[in-house]
Image: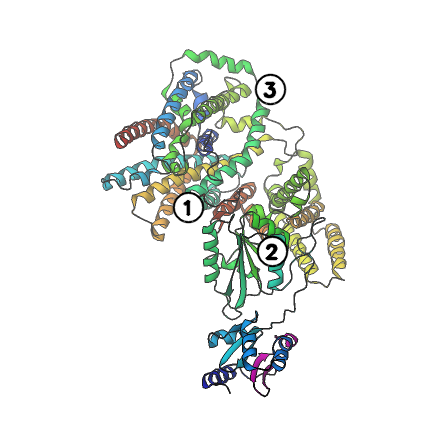
Amino acid sequence: MNDRGGRLLNRYFLYLVLLNMFVNVIIFVPKILIEYRYEGAVMGVVIAVPIGMALTYLYSTAMNQFPEQGLPEIVEQGKHRKLTILFFGTIQFMWFTAGLITLIGFIDILSRFVNPEMPKLGLLGIYLAGIFLIIQLPTQRIMYFLEIVLLINIPLISLIIFKAFINEYLSWDSILEVGTHIFTRPSLKAVAAATYCFSGYMNLIIFNRLIRGKLKIWNFTAILFLGLFNLFTTFLIPIGFHGSDGAQEYLYPWISTSDSLRLVYSPIERAIFLFLMFYMSITLVSVSVHWHVAYELIKGMFKGKISKKKNGLILGYFTVLAVLGVIYFNSLLLNRLTVYWMIFRLGVEIVIVAGFVLWARRRTT
Amino acid sequence: MPSNKVIAIRESLKSKLQPSEDLVFKEKFTKEKYLEVLYIKTISDEVVLHENVVKPFFETDSPEDFLNYLQSHAQIKAYENEQKAIDDVLRGEAVLFYQDHVFLFDCKVDRNNAVLDTTVETTIQGPQSGFSESLPVNLGLIRHRYPHTSLMVESTEVGRLSKTKVMILHDSKFADPVTVKRIKKFLGEVNIDMLETGEQLFDSLKKSNRALFPLMLVTERPDRVAVNLSNGKVIILVQGSPYAVILPTVMKDLMSSMEDIYQSYWIAKFLQLLRYTAFNVSMILPGLYVAISSYNPEVFRVQLALSIAGSRTGIPYPSFVEVLLMLFMMELLIEASIRLPKAIGPTATTVGGLILGQAAAEAGLASNIMTVIVSFVAISNFVIPINAFSFTIRVLKYFILLLSTLFGLVGVVLGFFMIIAYMVKLDSFGEAFLSALQSKPGKQ
């Protein structure tokens, strides 16, 4: 099972990127893009593709020089122990917040569309139980789990996307209308949101432990086309369904879009429930992947194996922030915060990638 | 006359073996010779003893010839130490005291050597006979199906009191040496008093000694053992049990029937698909019913939602009580029909399944749809080919039922994926439980 994918296409790398492409629906990417559809979102998307691809390429080829090692293993022998601790302690927060926004956003969706009567903390409880079970697994096993989840879910999401594309109520005119705004000056917020689709590569910081062999050009080609398709679907399908003006009325454009789909012969008539069930598992695994990275980075701050008490403290830290987040953030506040988080994330990503590429070059030559 | 050393051994052995009804000590004389025999008659074959020892003793004239005869006999070995001699006597060997020598003669009776028919893992076509309860016969059955020099057979003892003989078989060409070493280490560390059959090792596989998933495959089919040997698995045979243990076991093994290789390709694929569907149905369906009828009836199209709600109109309690009640009834029915004598078994199923189900629906204790779901779940459960695994699923559905009662649809989906995550976590001697391919030696 282990070393079959490495020849033409490294599937583990692809899964990580694909996961982020799926989860952008929860983390407000469509909402942000649609909000700026007349103010530079189209150009933003166009620009985001080369930026995202360049970052992906640079970072993953630099990481590729350390086969089967995550960052904690790479810097283990380094001299600047204190610097490493500081660095890990800071950047783990990026992954933690990425997971946290997804989690809070999806719990909000669940309490709106599936369980309106249930307290949000109850939903958080079951999610945390699942996430904590998963993040403590070895990295390899999380990848197995991710693979299984994608394997179960990809037919489902393909069906929904297929149904969306062939739907007679999809207005291509609205899509074209938004397309005419392509030459508007791009907005930074839209660029930042659109690059999120590509930023799955950042998980390599830990998941590089599983990547053996060189990443081939095929990986990047696949990511390019998947990213283009994904951005198009994320951004323009809701516009096609709700009209170029109407689309901005929705807080979760894609959830509302999936509610416009009807599966005529299926016992489950409203596609929204298939869609939500799909996202229940995708959110679970996405938050787990992000938090696993954060968890492993925090573990990398300590030498050797961590004790049970420290492990409990890490999970406690996750729990406390998640509970506070669910209590204090309503969906509008979360949406506004996410916009700035996206810009911040893009900046941090560029700094990390540039720094790492330079550092790796100095180390290997 | 025997020397002092031999007398000392004899007296010591006699005192260690408490005098019991079936302990035999006999002395035999001829003009030149003097032989003493010590054995337990209930587990030693007296006919064999007579043919091989007593008769030659009286037929041979010179003492040297008889000594030579004893020393060259294939089933006679020299005495090593007292503890081993006692162990062997307790297994049915006889101790011979002759001149200055002490010998052990292997005359064990093997009473359970009849080959049994398969009753648990039946197939329509293909071999129909299983193992016997005798270790040598079982080994012979496997060797008969797997005639290769690379088949390695080693034996050890497990169980503090029972000292059960256990054989470890593997094909040195295919099996991963690391896995074999792990399994031997595991057998050496098993902490158990009485080992009667391989199934007892289920719990020992986990550190906590509490297992839910069977991480080894227990089979009664020699053909399955032979096929698995050729796939690089390690086989454990236990004295006195008609079941062999196959290690390491992944989920794919637990979902496979021997029929898969006796049927043609597409039919086997279809049957496998059926099994995996049944696995999911039997795990999820009760929980899904609760989630949909109590939390999110709008999931289904309106006609279906109405017909479910309609059939529940007369039911005076929430859906999870209804499900629990019916599942409880079903579990009792299954247990009863396993324990009942074969002659009454079918009656119980008829009374329970048909009449009770119908009556419960008419009495307004459960909806008609619930009755259908419960029988669906039960039948799906029986489709799982390995019995130990189908018991696991019987328990798992309550986990999902609990989560769906508390959280609705979210509980069903997350419960299902939590179970998958747990299965991803499991491994059997280094082999991930959900892996789809068998690992080969030489690769990590």
Chain of the residue displaying label 1? A
Q: What residue sits right under mark 2 in the picture?
A: B143
* Label 1 secondary element: loop
Q: CA distance from mark 1 to mark 3?
A: 45 Å
Q: What residue sits right under mark 3 in the picture?
A: A169
Same chain check for tags 2 and 1:
no
Is residue A66 found left or right of A283 in the rendered image?
left
Question: Quadrant of the rendered structure where residue A132 is?
Answer: top left
Which of the labelled discs sits on residue A136, or is there none?
Answer: 1
Q: Is residue A323 above or below residue A215?
A: below
Residue A116 point in image, percent of width and height: 53, 38
* Label 2 secondary element: helix
Q: CA distance from mark 3 to mark 2?
A: 68 Å
Q: Earlier in the sequence, mark 1 or mark 3?
A: 1
Residue B429 point in image, percent of width and height: 48, 52
Is residue A283 found left or right of A314 in the rendered image?
right
Residue A213 point in image, percent of width and height: 41, 33
* Amino acid at dot 1: Gln
The mark lying in front, picked from 1 and 3, is 1
Is residue A238 found left or right of B358 in the rendered image?
left
Q: Residue at x 39, y 44 (%)?
A: A319
B303, B21: nearer the viewer: B21
- What segment is highlighted magenta in the picture? B20-48
